[in-house]
């Protein structure tokens, strides 16, 4: 595995420390990261306006983690399950009509439609997170996730160990140690958003 969303929750391994199956590798901590993104969005856009969440059927666990976190904090969410680009467009349009304060896309499908989401979110003046760091440089507002380049590099080490005879069941699943926060001030200006200074100081990269 090179960046699995939730290996234990998906039943791929018995535990991170002791996989006990024919799988091992790295987790990208997508569930924990999605919850952190929600917290950052509420810091970015404080107030009572709901956060619209776009999620696909494959990211049900992530949606449930975000929903649980919001419920415990008393934050309102708008749920939009999407399966294709048409539903992505409809979801963002509905989020804007419902006066959502921000947009949180999660899952593989929204990762593939990052450019479309960036364009529609900017046009709707919706602050939104992106899973692809390159998209923030093109049109997106903010990115926060585990460093995938490091994860993929570490995956090669697992391949080497297994080819040398190690059993996947005995190799603990690794979790990411580096997370990147990227903010695009050009997009912030385009949607009329002021980024809190405290958030800018925590960013690994600020695009001017």
Image (cartoon, helix red, strand yellow):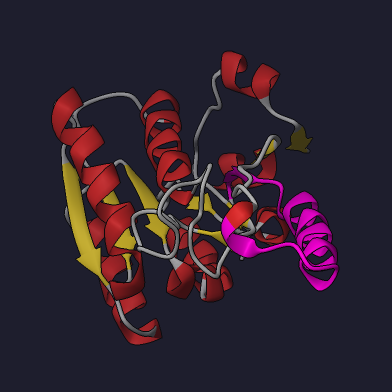
Q: How many marks?
A: 0
Q: Nearer the viewer, residue 172 or 201?
A: 172
- In the picture, measured across the screen, residue 30 lies left or right of residue 161, that is left
**Magenta stretch, overall SS:** helix
Q: Residue at x 37, y 51 (%)?
A: 103
- Residue 41 on image: x %, y %: 41, 34
Q: Is residue 150 magenta?
A: yes
Depicted 168 relative to depicted 35: above or below = below
Res 124 quadrant in image: bottom left
Quarter of the figure with the C terminus: top right
Q: Residue furthest top?
A: 198
Q: Residue at x 51, y 75 (%)?
A: 113
Q: Nearer the viewer, residue 30 or 1?
A: 1
- Residue 32 on image: x %, y %: 43, 39
- Residue 146 on image: x %, y %: 64, 45
Residue 100 visible from this viewpoint: no
- Residue 173 on image: x %, y %: 59, 49
- In the picture, measured across the screen, residue 61 lies left or right of residue 124, that is left
Q: Is residue 147 magenta?
A: yes
- In the picture, measured across the screen, residue 34 lies left or right of residue 73, that is right
Q: Residue at x 85, y 68 (%)?
A: 164
Depicted 111 relative to depicted 87: above or below = above
Quarter of the figure with the N terminus: bottom right
Residue range highlighted in magenta: 141-169
Depicted 182 relative to depicted 86: above or below = above
Res 196 quadrant in image: top right
């Amino acid at each position: 595995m090179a960046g699995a969303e939730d290996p234990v929750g998906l039943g791929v391994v018995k535990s991170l420390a002791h996989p006990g199956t024919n799988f091992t590798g790295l987790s990208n901590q997508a569930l924990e990261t999605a919850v952190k993104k929600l917290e950052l969005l509420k810091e970015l856009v404080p107030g009572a306006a709901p956060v619209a969440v776009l999620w696909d059927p494959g990211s049900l666990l992530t949606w449930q983690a975000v929903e649980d976190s919001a419920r415990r904090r008393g934050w309102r969410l708008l749920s939009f399950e999407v399966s294709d680009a048409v539903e992505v467009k409809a979801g963002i349009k509905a989020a804007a009509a419902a006066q959502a304060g921000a947009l949180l896309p999660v899952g593989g499908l929204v990762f593939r439609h990052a450019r479309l989401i960036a364009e529609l979110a900017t046009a709707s003046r919706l602050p939104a997170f992106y899973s692809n760091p390159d998209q923030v440089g093109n049109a997106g507002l903010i990115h926060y996730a585990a460093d995938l380049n490091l994860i993929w590099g570490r995956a090669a080490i697992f391949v080497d160990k297994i080819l040398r005879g190690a059993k996947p069941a005995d190799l603990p699943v690794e979790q990411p140690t580096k997370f990147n926060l990227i903010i695009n001030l050009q997009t912030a200006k385009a949607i009329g958003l002021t980024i809190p200074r405290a958030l800018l100081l925590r960013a690994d990269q600020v695009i001017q």
